[in-house]
Structure formats: C-alpha cells, structure tokens
Image (cartoon, rainbow, N blue to C red):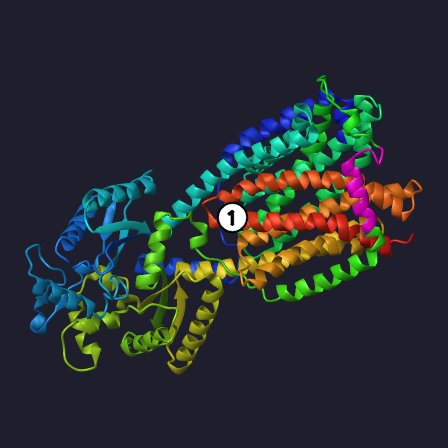
Amino acid sequence: MKLSGISIQYPWLAIFLFAIISAFSIFGSNSEKENRKIKSGKAKADYKFTKAVSREFGPDGSEIILLINHKEKNGDLFEKGASESYKKLIKRIKKIPSVSQVFSFDQIPSYGMGLIRLSLFPDKGASISQRNECRKRALNHPIIVGHLLSSDARTSLIPISLNLKPNEEISNVLNLIRKEANKVLNGSKLEAKLTGKIPIDIARREAMKTEKLRFQIIGYVLSAILALIFFRGVVMTLIVTLPPFVGVLWTIGMLGFTNERLNSLSMVIMPIILTMIGFTNAAHIVFQFRRELIIGLGRKEAMTVSMQKLGLPCMLSALTTAAGFASLTVAESNMISDFGRDCAVGTLITFIAVILLLPLLGLLPIPLKVQMESHSIKINSSSWQKFILILIRFVIKNAKWVVSISVVLTIFFGWLTSNLKPDMHLLNQLPDESESGEALKQADKSLGGIQAIRIVTEWESDNDNPIPIIRKIEEIVEQEKLLSRPLSVRGVLDSLPGFGKDLSLRMPLLKKAPQDLINTLYRPDINKAVVITRIQDLGVAQYTPVYERLERKLEELSKSNPGYKFGLAGGAVGWGRYVHRMLNDMALSLAAASIIILVMISIAFRSLRIGLISMIPNLFPLLACAAVLAFFKMPLSLEIVCAFTICLGIAADDAIHFLSRYLSEKKNGLDVNHALEISFIRVGQVLIATTVVLLCGLGSVLFSSLPMYRAFTSVACATLSTALIADLIILPALLKLFDKK
C-alpha cells in the first residue's frame, strides 16, 4: 500500500499531508448547510404546484397551529371561565408584533334571516342558556366543526400567520406565543400547544441536533471503553479509535469546503456509518500489528507487515462499501442521492485517514504494552481459543447441515420480506411527549389531522358557475374515510342566509364573510377555487392510495366537464409521495448495492465462486431482520433502510477480511480445514471484538427520545449480531463445501 508506506517511510510527509487535509476540513466545516431540494419526478412537480397554489391562495393554515384543548373530559370551550380564557389568549397573541393573523372559529360570522349577525361565542356575563345557544350555533355551522372546532367543542385549532422582520428568528416568535399561552392559561382548565409544519420541523431539527451530539459522545466513550478492554492499553485504544474519528471530521469538512450541502440524513447517520466502517478496518490492522509485535518484530517492521497483509483487504472493503453507497446517487430524491454521495466519499476519506494516520500513531515513540502470555499465537493456548476452535470444527464437520439450513432460512426470510411495506409517520420524527407531537395526536383524534390537502379547480370561461363542480369534489372527498370534512366556498355560501338549493344566488353575500377566509378558497379573478381537507398522520403507505384515487376521480370529473381542470396541492401530498418514493429508491439501491458488492468481490479475488459464496452471509442478516419486521407487520421506514445499508457494508467488510485471510492461508499451502481454523481464530476474534464494541456504542441510542433513532439502532444492532453469526458460521460452511481448489 503506497499511501500507508508514506506514513512508514516518510512520516514527516505524512504529518504534512495530515495537517493540510485537516486545515481544509476545519475551514470547510463552517460552510455546512442543509439541502432539502427535490431532485426530479412527481414529487418535484407536486412541490412546484403547491408553491404556485400558495402564491395564489396564501398559506393553507397548516404552517403554525395553536391547539387549545379543555383538560377535563366532559368540559368544553363554551364554559364560563374557559371561554373568557380563550378570548383573552387570542387577544394577547394578536398583539405580538410579528403575528399578522390569528384565525379562530369565533371570528367566523353566523347570520340569521335579514343578515342579523348571531354570536358564536358567549360574552363574559352570558347565562348558561346563552352559552348553550352559542355552542349549538357553532356546532351546526357548516364551516366550523371539523375544521376549527371539534364535534365535542372541547378542542380548537387556530391557524397563525407571521410577518417576520428582517433577521428575526421564527423560533423566538413561537416562544413568545408559548409564553403568552402559559401566562393566560395558567390555573385555567385550558391548555395550549403549538404544532404545524414549522413547529414540527423546528422540534425535529433541534431534537436531532441535541441527540446527535449527546449519543455520539456517549457512543464514542462506550466504544473507547470497550476498545480499551479488548486492546488492553490506552495507546492501542487511541491508535484504533482516533483515525476513524478524524476521518469523519475530514469528510464533513471536505464536503463543506467543496460547497456540498449536507442534508439532515447525512449530518446524523453518516458520522455513525463512517465511524463504524473506519473502526472495523482499524481494528483489523491493530490486531495484526499487535500479533506481529508478539512474535518479536520491531515496531516499524510490524507495522509494515501488517499493512502489507491487510492494506488490500481494507481497501477492497472501502471500495465495495463506497460503491454500495454510490448506488444511491441515482435515486429520485436529492436527500437519498446526496446521502449516497456523502457516504461514498466519506468511506474513501475515512479509509485514507485510517491508513495514513494509524501507522503514524503506531510508530510514535510511546511504550506499548503487549502481553505475551495473553496473546500467544499458539492455537491451543487459551480457553477462548479452545472454544472457538471447537466451534469452527463443529461447523466444518456439519457444513452440509449448516448450509442447507441457511439456504432454507434465507429463502424463507426472503419470502416473508416480500410482505414488508414502506411506510413512515410524521410523529416518529418527533421526540417522545414533545409539544408538537402531543398536539398532532390530539388534532388527529379530534379534528382529522393538521396536514392539509388542497384540491384546486380551474375553469376556462368567466361565465361558468363552479359551485356545482365544487360540490362534486366535496362528495369525492367525503367518500374517503381517511380525509376530514371538506372546506370550500360552497360551505361558506351554505352558512349565509337565503332560500332554495341554488347557492349561486347567495354569491353577492360573500362580502359579508371574512375576506381572509374567502381569499383562501375562491379566486374568481383568476377562475380558480380550492377545496381544503386534511389527513391524519397515518403514514405515507396509506397516503399514496388516497392520492391516486382522488386523482383518478378528478380526471373522470374533468372528462365529464370540459373546460375544468383539477390538481392536488399541499405539503401532505408532496411529502407523502416524496417519502414513499425515497423509501422505494433506497430499497432498490440496497439491491443494487448487493450486486455491486458481488461483482467487486468476484473481481478482487478473481473468482465468481468466491463472490457468490460471500453473498449468502451478506444477505442473510438483512433478510432475517427484514423478515422479523414483516412477521410483526412493522413498516420499512427510512431509518430502517439506512440501518440495512450500513449493515450490508459492514457484513461485506467482515466477509472480505475473512476471505482474504482464508485465501492467504490456502496460498501458503494449508488445506481447506486448517485454513478455515486459522482464519476463524485470527479474524474471528477481531470480528467478535469489533461487533461487541459497535453494539455497545450503538446501544446507547436505544435510550433516545426519538422513535426513529431507536428504530434505527434496534435494527442495526440486530442485523450486526446476525451478520457476525453469518460470517463465523455460514461463510466457513460454504467455503468448506464449495471451495474445493
């Protein structure tokens, strides 16, 4: 390995290269930004259409929502005391300078005959009968219940619009709203929570940032402690743990220096991936380095021999892993494409960091403690080695049974995995018991959710009457059980006084309705109108069929009504399709990565047979864990696919190291059995040590408050454990049966 040879033969040049790369990385780390753009396809078209509709009709009311709920099960907002607190809070929030609009249900007028305005909310001194009358009037209003007020009058949604000043942080305004809510509602029977796209996004990013830092520190500390136990010395521990850490810093810095934007997936998941991959390769080299020291080689010679033996397998494992990640770059979504690019580049950079920095650290004039009696190269020197020798001999003796059972299980797991469906919930991206999450659940339960869908109607002639068509759209929406009650200009007309079923006769009365509301529903100046509905946080797997049915029915409606065009807009539409497409992309890329790894292993070892042999141990752990998910009807979420991608790379790395050692021993003249025994003992103990360290490092994340982190960690730990079993049991058995040369 020429690059590692630089560190051994020309240490000052290596130090210079280390300093230069580090300097560029430090400079570049300040230019890290998040990329949320959509690459192409239907999701991008949805996004553009939604933006256009927002420009024409304004926000859909889902950006910032204040949810007010009565704490008592049988209470409602019309009670004495509760109504006063409600009105006071609305008044106080309106006075916040950056708040441009607060739209509560009590602002919607109710008219009797003769356009007599009727109160929807009781005054302070109202009697019980007056309060009951207001409650009845509000619950019977066509555009209030199901949109701004729950059917039990216990919960209210209040959309809030902001007009931020230059350089004003939106989180500061949200904190002011919370402060006013806490002040007004303190001691009352009401509680207020903020939710909506913006508060949810802020809560998600803040939690991810906090948890990322916290658990990376905990994970590194736990990994270092375990490494200290395995390597029996502080110096050896630093040698094996520092290069991967430096590789992560280099990657983030170099990507930033080249002005590449890091999305949330890359910022959170990528450091974990690179640390795991880098640590695995570093551990193999350090174990070999220590072994060479034990047999009496000098430090420089021991490091040279170690790099000669393991440099190529480490490079091959880095290339196969990078190629696997590179397969993600063809994904439709920018998030997945950029994630694949970042991880591919990061894998190679981390590899460079390991083979450049590790020899430097190993050659530092610092005493190394190498316990000869504990690490003898004799096969039968310890009880541990006796145990693993018994295990490998059992595997060799029963290779046919091991392979047969493995093949049957792999096929069975593959069949179960076919039932696995991609899905993702908004709530899983939020920390447990977060304000936005609790409000989201309450809104789902009481008001049909907060995620808005706008069905846009456009007509050609200025003389057309769109009201009958809008009613047909409402009927389509009402057929979908997952959608909330539709809101449209037709509903507003229905709330106005008048006789007869022809609501178009009431059009002149629209000026009596709140114009802010009308402008979000009806634009006769551009021949457009929208019907607004909402969908609960049921997961993208249920979103997509709903959207497909809506679009199909709207297309039929367009055919039967020439001159009318329809479209779906809203964050829920774009997000649902985007995530669904993203999950499918990652699943397909995972399959592509498996093929790429097969090809590269076959080329590297110049044997298709060896490449095919390596595939079952690589795929077995993924299929096993995926089958468990499918059996318990758990969804294939984004974080789980990420875990599978990581574990495929690590499983392939472990298989490469085992195969490399096995083929090397055979080249030295050993038969299959003895080559497997030596490989199992030498490489197996490294695989066990690295897996235990990784499991302990990752295991800390199981205590995360974010469900997506816990899901990622659970699947990653289970898959890594299964991968270890596959590499130590299934792979040797396959080699025993099918490698006869």
Q: Kindly give the residue lying farthest to the front in the view shown.
A: 383
Q: What element carries label 1?
A: helix
Look at mark 1 in the image and give the residue it sits on.
Answer: 710
Q: Residue at x 62, y 63 (%)?
A: 417
Can residue 243 be seen? no
Side of 579 relative to 59 (left or right) = right
Q: x and y percent of residue 652 in the render? A: 72, 48
Q: Main secondary structure of the magenta part?
A: helix
- Amino acid type at circle 1 is Arg
Q: Badge 1, how many Cα within 10 Å: few under 14, some, many 20+?
A: many
Side of 252 relative to 95 (left or right) = right
Which quarter of the figure is the N terminus placed in? top right
Q: x and y percent of residue 208 in the render? A: 46, 43
Can residue 178 be seen? yes
Q: x and y percent of residue 345 in the render? A: 64, 42
Q: What segment carries the magenta color?
A: 378-394
